[in-house]
Amino acid sequence: MSELVVGILGFACIVALVVTLFKSKTMPSMAFIIFPSILALILVVGGYYSIDQIGDLIKGGFKSTGPTAALFVFSVLFFGIMTDAGMFDVIINKLMKHVGDNVIGVTVMTALIALIGHLDGGGASTFLIVVPAMLPVYKKMHMRPSTLLRVAVLAMGVLNLMPWAGPTMRAASVLGMEAGQLWGKLIPIQIFGIVLCLAHAVFAGIQEKKRGAGLNGKLAQEASAEDAAEEAQHEADENEYARPKLFAFNVCLTIAVIAMLVWDKFPSYFPFMLGVAAALLVNYTPIKMQKKMINRHAGPALMMCSTLMGAAVLMGVLVYGFNTDGAAVIAKPGVEMMKTSVVSNMAGIISMILPAALGQHLPLVIGILSVPLALCFDTDSYFYGMLPVMIAIGASFGVEAFPIAVAMVVCRNCATFISPMVPATLLGIGLADVDIKDHIKASFGYVWIFSIFCMLFAVVLGILPL
């Protein structure tokens, strides 16, 4: 089976996956398992991989998503326990006193928290800071969780240009320069992006206000009897599980968990494992109550964990290839590959299509296509697989490597956290209880326009040639 055919099959798999998710034909976890498995079977029949190699690829995929799955399970448990203990109710009530009925204030606050939270460059940690803090406010003010995610991911995409963030480091390594040097050229674009994401937050607030969101808005006045019943049930639960006397302890514990996460000396899931243990031991001493608390939050944790485990199959079959030692790895500079990954072959097809007509304007073409391509490529494959190919193509047309890398970094970063190929995205939608298709539908158009604005600003500055 030729590499061209493998690449075409890879695109067919992605298209089938996206169409199935958007038409709500099955749960994401099932789609992530079924379509890559069909692709794997075709590749085995075609002689591209052996059965044993497919097994190695799937194991490799679990290396990518396994830690995120563990992180999700324990973070859901931790924040669920903190919510039941009443910690967030106290914080939300204080926030609401400052914000009042100001819907725009809520969306701007979301963007600011995401900008500050993403200073460490970690998508998972930022979602864990932003979503649990703001989701109860959005629900109380009858605002859509999908808007919360959209505001957050645009802010996170802008901060993802930091030199210690993954995309910038990867692009710098391909260019053979320091990440700080690359970032120095991107700072004006980043400042523009921060202003733009705050403007978008104001716009998102206006949209929600027009829908009738707010404490005294139409949606609040039209709350159904079912909502009232849910509120009554919530109050009953509060009485049973609330621990107002332990508020100070729970706040300190939450700060300690997030600080450990940002410190980044331990696996990301370990701080939440400690947090869950401490929260249960202090807040709910009887073992029966501890079991009850875990059972209360086991459903959402298991549902999202299954999605992440399904994504492991997708990542393994599409992203991993084999090095000269026969080990399943993601292709990186300096690593010789015995058999390239499906995604690498997909990148090869794109490289064959683009240069014939658009070689002279390659940075702009890549910039425009970066957001749609982000749905097909994970970060490693995009920068380690596609960027070197695009640089080689650009060289044949006299286009320098630097503007190509800038276009790929800036425009792709905007779409990082709407891509199902990025495990942190699945964590974010799980915390917000939003389907992946709804997240993509609500965010895709805005993210694409946002990325084009950033690209045009780079053109105005002379960083990207016309």
Image (cartoon, helix red, strand yellow):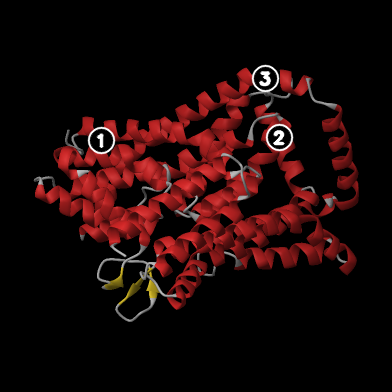
Q: Residue furthest bottom?
A: 325
Residue 208 in view of the camera: yes
Query: At label 2, which amino acid type do we have?
Result: Lys
Q: Residue furthest front?
A: 45
Left or right of 19? Residue 47 is left
Residue situated in front as seen by the camera: 394 or 18: 18
Residue 16 is situated, as x and y percent measured from the top left of the image, at: 48, 47
Residue pictured at 32% horizontal, 40% vertical: 369
Alpha-carbon neighbours of circle 3 within 10 Å: few (<14), some, or many (≥20)? many
The residue beneath circle 3 is 212
Determine whether 53 is above or below 150 in the image. Answer: below
Residue pictured at 48% horizontal, 54% vertical: 422
The residue beneath circle 2 is 139
Residue pictured at 46% horizontal, 36% vertical: 444
Residue 377 in view of the camera: no
Residue situated in front as seen by the camera: 269 or 338: 338
Helix, strand or loop at mark 1:
helix
Alpha-carbon neighbours of circle 2 within 10 Å: few (<14), some, or many (≥20)? few
Residue 458: give its label: 1
Residue pictured at 74% horizontal, 53% vertical: 80
Determine whether 143 is above or below 316 in the image. Answer: above
Location of the C terminus by quadrant is top left
Q: Are marks 3 and 2 in contact (CB under 8 Å)?
A: no
Determine whether 359 is above or below 1 in the image. Answer: above
Along the polypeptide, which appears first: circle 3 or circle 2? 2
Residue situated in front as seen by the camera: 441 or 38: 38
Along the polypeptide, which appears first: circle 1 or circle 3? 3
What is the total number of numbered labels drawn onto the structure image?
3
Tell me the distance, in whole angstroms, between the alpha carbons under discs 3 and 2. Answer: 13 Å
